[in-house]
Amino acid sequence: MKLELGKINIKDVQFGPETKVEQGVLYVNEEEVIRIAKLDDRILDAKVELARPGESVRIAPVKDVIEPRVKVSRGDGAIFPGMLNKVKQVGSGRTHALVGATVITCGRIVGFQEGLIDMSGPAAKYVPFSQTNNVCVVIEPVEGLTTHDYEAAGRMVGLRVAAYIGEAGRDATPDEIKVYETKPIVEQIQQYPDLPKVGYIHMLQSQGLLHDTYYYGVDAKQMVPTFMYPTEIMDGAIVSGNCVAPCDKVTTFHHFNNPVIADLYERHGVDINFIGVILTNENVFLADKERSSDMVAKLCQFLCLDGVIITEEGYGNPDTDLMMNCKKVSQAGVKVVLITDEFPGKDGKSQSLADAVDEADALVSCGNGNEIIHFPPMERLIGTLDFIESMIGGYEGSLKEDGSIDAELQIVIASTIANGYNKLAAKGY
Amino acid sequence: MKKYKVVHYINQFFASIGGEEMADIPPEIRPGIVGPGLALQNGLGEGYEVVATIICGDNFFGSNMKEATETILAMIAPYEPDLFVAGPAFNAGRYGVACGAVSKEIGERLEIPAITGMYSENPGVDMFRKDLHIIQTANSAADMRKAMPKICKLAKKMLSGEEILSPEEEGYFERGIRVNYFNEERGSARAIDLLVEKMAGRPYETEYPMPEFDRVPPNPPVEDISKVKIAIVTSGGIVPQGNPDRIESSSATKYGVYSIADMKTMSKDDFMTVHGGYDRQFVLENPNLVIPLDVLREMEDEGVIGELADYFVTTTGTGTAVGSAKRFGQEFTKKLLEDQIGAVILTST
């Protein structure tokens, strides 16, 4: 499977009468975005605000972040298959991405698990979206909407608006075209017969309502582990529907731009042979955990892998899935490296993980989410600060009168994301 | 110019009182420096004054730890020290344990920086490395010349509030405190580097060695539940409406004890959940899903259980540090025992 990803670099975002890309500037028709958001009758009203790097802006509570993309080649399916568009195999042909732009959904809270983005100041360095030009859609649900319906409505608004803005990249000339290719297993092994065969075990958050992920529209907790060509994810085969702790959230942006997949392709043919991705879930029932980890180990063995990288989404309960996968895959004779983040308490002294196995002897840390961070006041607020003290990472007294905040780093969206997207790490002092 | 006042702790040997035969002497205090105090004073330099030295026999401290610590605290209080330095103890085991224990206690009680130094195999290292900065020394006093300047350098930083760098940079034993930093490479790239080394059979180093957990053996089964008073303890975040004690939705630092006296069921008008780790909607509708009061009342009426305590204990389990959870348990268990609770139902979510 081969995908050409055309990257259109976006340096600025502005409102304009027509949604288009011109000389690196994304122009957005505000009324049209509002109209699209309100297509969902669960949404009473919507506002659009822009947030650019370096501005004195705080965005909260953030639900999802999505990079605008569009499928350019005909007959190769469309973006977000099974969610927004019809189910059809994706991952081949040509796709355009507006790199440096995002759509951010925010507004009244669905769960405690939504977080913050600061566009400048000391907390900006923890979040990649302080460096992107963001179209923020602030949604207001109709009266009496259940949290589950509100989550679904917010998720669909984000996908619709991102797909609409992505269309602006259809006819634009990419600044760069990257080609990614993974061949069927036998051919792929033969391409670099002397290099170690490496796979990626991608654990999707599936703990239950408000902690969900979708693969071609299938709720990940209802699937069994399966093989995925890495390029499928670049076309939106995986969509975030979860509200896991903000710092851990694998946003839809991060699925498009999965760092393990990107970096494995970088090393493909250099010192490894990247065979593909095994998707699995993080269900709460022990029987599901046993079944899924058994099947992950079986797939690793079937694909003749020499080594795998495993990532998780969330902390606590999914640490068990991470460790079961690590143990069983290691026992199948495959070398394992784990990527995760740490929660050792505010004093940094407790155990960073909720579970551990002896086989987990090679782990990459994405930072300590319990560290207390200061967020100075910002001139402009997109969304609301009403929920700060009850959000994950907040506590009594977090929000000060002047609008500044003291809270655990875990309140920042994707700040310690456990797939290695960031450079943040923790070490022993 | 104000001078920082420093109190130094040494044992009978370093005070030139004697060796093993004098290890039973009780604590005494002398004004100014004694023995290695000279190296300490020189290392700290101007602006610091070693105002007093505590001398205590290693055996005396070891067998009278509580009493010795109280005596030492009383002795040094009039000096109002800004800094406490013990040792270094090198490879002397009992001395090391004393240096660790006294530094920890004085640092915490007087709220001043406290520091010591030891050899890596000194048992005091593993006992106190989490609580203290312990400078790594060689195994004998011949290393005093090198060890004391390191102690002084770090002590000055602790006093001034200057950033304390990593264990390698400062020369102290890793305390197991996890601190954030920005690596040059992102995590995914580092993971591939690690995997390539591991697959090639070359040495590799994890960024986080697996932690150890306390495994608590369960108590024997309750013999006759119909004669026992039961309490409910939960990590499911159930609190009275409005969350009066502001228990956090994640990474809890508090727990609550709330009344269920005269209640037949957990009403959604009275209780809610603040837990940030699961879908709350069903529990908001029916808090009995986490605190099964409705069923337990029936069992109480039918005599299946002896009695139900008229309160429950609650916190948020998600993201809560083991250290915090341990403290909660130690605290509220006293109440449970006082109230003659014979068994607890722990509900998690």
Image (cartoon, rainbow, N blue to C red):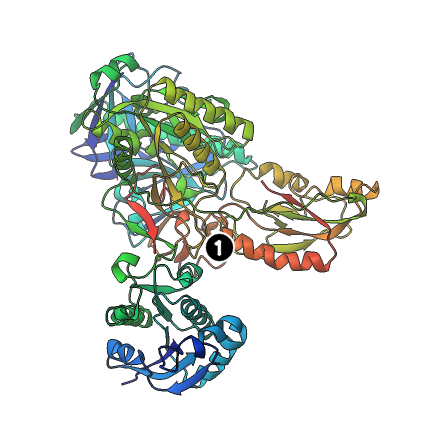
Image quarter of the C terminus of chain A: bottom left
Is B136 left or right of B210, judged from the image as shown? Answer: left
> Residue A239: in sight, yes or no?
yes
Image quarter of the N terminus of chain A: top left
Location of residue A322 in the rendering, given as x and y in whole percent from the top left corner: 43, 34
Quadrant in which residue A26 is drawn: top left
Image height of A228 relative to B180, above or below: above
Direction bottom: furthest residue: B31
Direction right: furthest residue: B302
What chain letter is assigned to the residue under label 1?
A: A
Location of residue A245 in the rendering, given as x and y in whole percent from the top left corner: 44, 42
Image height of A71 relative to B154, above or below: above
- A82 and A49: which is toward the camera: A82
Image height of A298 relative to B33, above or below: above
- B58 and A318: which is toward the camera: B58
Secondary-structure class at tag 1: loop
Amino acid on which the number 1 mark rests in the picture: Tyr
- A153 and B275: which is toward the camera: B275
Residue drawn 33% across the image and 33% down it: A253
Q: Which residue is mark 1?
A: A395
Location of residue A29 in the rendering, given as x and y in whole percent from the top left corner: 30, 33
Direction front: furthest residue: B21
Location of residue A395 in the rendering, given as x and y in whole percent from the top left corner: 48, 55
Is B214 left or right of B3, judged from the image as shown? Answer: right
Within-10-Å neighbours for mark 1: few <14, some 14–19, many 20+: many
> Residue A172: in sight, yes or no?
no
Residue drawn 30% across the image and 38% down it: A421
Quadrant in which residue B57 is drawn: bottom left
- A340 and A394: which is toward the camera: A340
